[in-house]
Amino acid sequence: MQRPVCLRQHHKAARLDRPRSAVRQISITATIAPERPWSVNNNNNNNGSGPSTSSATTTTILQGKAVEEYAMWKCIESHQRYPKGLPLPKLQWSSAVLDDAYARCGEVTAEYAKTFYLGTQLMTPVQAKAIWAIYVWCRRTDELVDGPNASKITPKALDRWEERLEAIFEGRPYDVLDAALTDTLTQFPLDIQPFRDMIEGMRMDLVKTRYETFDELYEYCYRVAGTVGLMSMPVMGIDPSYKGPMEKVYRAALALGTANQLTNILRDVGEDIKQRNRIYVPMQELREYGISEEDLLAHVHSPSSSGVDDRWRAFMKFQIERSQQYFRDAESGVDWLDGKARWPVWSALILYRQILDAIQRNDYDNFTKRAYVPKWKKFASLPMAFSRAMMPMSKE
């Protein structure tokens, strides 16, 4: 199953899409580095150099939608408290090195998320570079559990990766790509919580292969896709004419992440079972439609035809309608993004929605048929997304 990059376009943003052929080799493989001479600050003593990233005082274990809610309010708080960026120590990397790091991030984004990269060309250079830096961090994180070294990754390795994240937010990046993200933090009010939550989503992929309820699945969707919306919102910006609560726009970003991820899950049901022994659709809801795990393994086959049976069609209609509702929830908030950011977001929304249409055209057979949007249709959708971005309906 692929994770969308939400406001980037995909996360497995679903294993990230890998190109059939690379124009040039761009190494972004994250190295789980050995212990640094310093350790991550866990006592809120950061010498006043910036906002504390310590989670040591967190005692309540959140689950389900509460995870997303907590992170959203943390992000809104940071957005309001540090509107011009986090007060971090001056980086020890030269401007030339940072420029090169951002350029590498841009190349990776262009190679692996072509349509979304095109959308960033409408943003200011500073915005575009920040989105590229966020994308690359997300991709490197995803590669830990879905990349060539995934079989060697342990929960301890993810703990080390989280320590490295803490260092980025303390102004002590480990390498040049980390430095690009740290530099981004000094220009935009990003909060660390969604980054932490994404790493926790990777932990879930290491140990969890079934989701009993939709609440469990919702948490996973937030961690691997909704998080990108929270990361990107401060960079995308909010339209200056919008005077309402910031919460509305943040919730729209989260809704789009959930919709994209649910769409990926529905598209990849057969692939996930066959290749990864994973069932992401809620087991409880399968039982409500009279479908067992054994039925899934048999592709819910209809004995009177070569396709799926009526139980699966009914189940999929319900799942698709729920995903469509999250797309609808996202629409009004997307219209209140800054004008330069609306086109790439509308592109992602329209293109992912068309995957649901493709599943329906395949008679809901997502076991033996791949639902995809032809390239010509993707390109044909771009003018529609551009028009919607330039003339947002919620402002009419």
Image: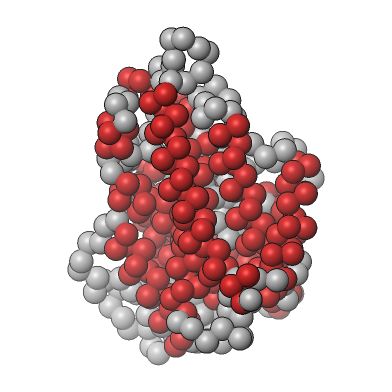
Residue drawn 52% across and 56% down?
327
Residue that extends furthest to the top in the rendered view of this protein: 304
Residue drawn 73% across and 46% down?
378
> Residue 9 occupies which quadrant of the picture?
bottom right
Horizontally, residue 300 falls left or right of residue 183, namely left
Residue drawn 61% across and 80% down?
239
> Could one spot residue 84 in this view of the protein?
yes
Expressed as whole percent of the image width and height from the top left, the position of residue 118 reads: 75, 59
Total numbered labels placed on residues in the image:
0
Horizontally, residue 89 falls left or right of residue 218, namely right
Residue drawn 31% across and 37% down?
285
Nearest to the observer: residue 379 or residue 160: 379
Q: Is residue 282 above or below residue 61?
A: above
Q: Is residue 13 above or below residue 253?
A: above
Expressed as whole percent of the image width and height from the top left, the position of residue 373 reads: 67, 40
Q: Is residue 151 above or below residue 60?
A: above
Quarter holding the C terminus is bottom right
Nearest to the observer: residue 371 or residue 221: 371
> Residue 347 occupies which quadrant of the picture?
bottom right
> Residue 195 occupies which quadrant of the picture?
bottom left
Q: How is the image coloured?
A: secondary structure
Q: Is residue 82 above or below residue 136?
A: below
Expressed as whole percent of the image width and height from the top left, the position of residue 97 reads: 70, 71
Expressed as whole percent of the image width and height from the top left, the position of residue 237 reads: 59, 77
Residue that extends furthest to the left in the rendered view of this protein: 59
> Could one spot residue 166 in this view of the protein?
no
Horizontally, residue 245 falls left or right of residue 355, namely left
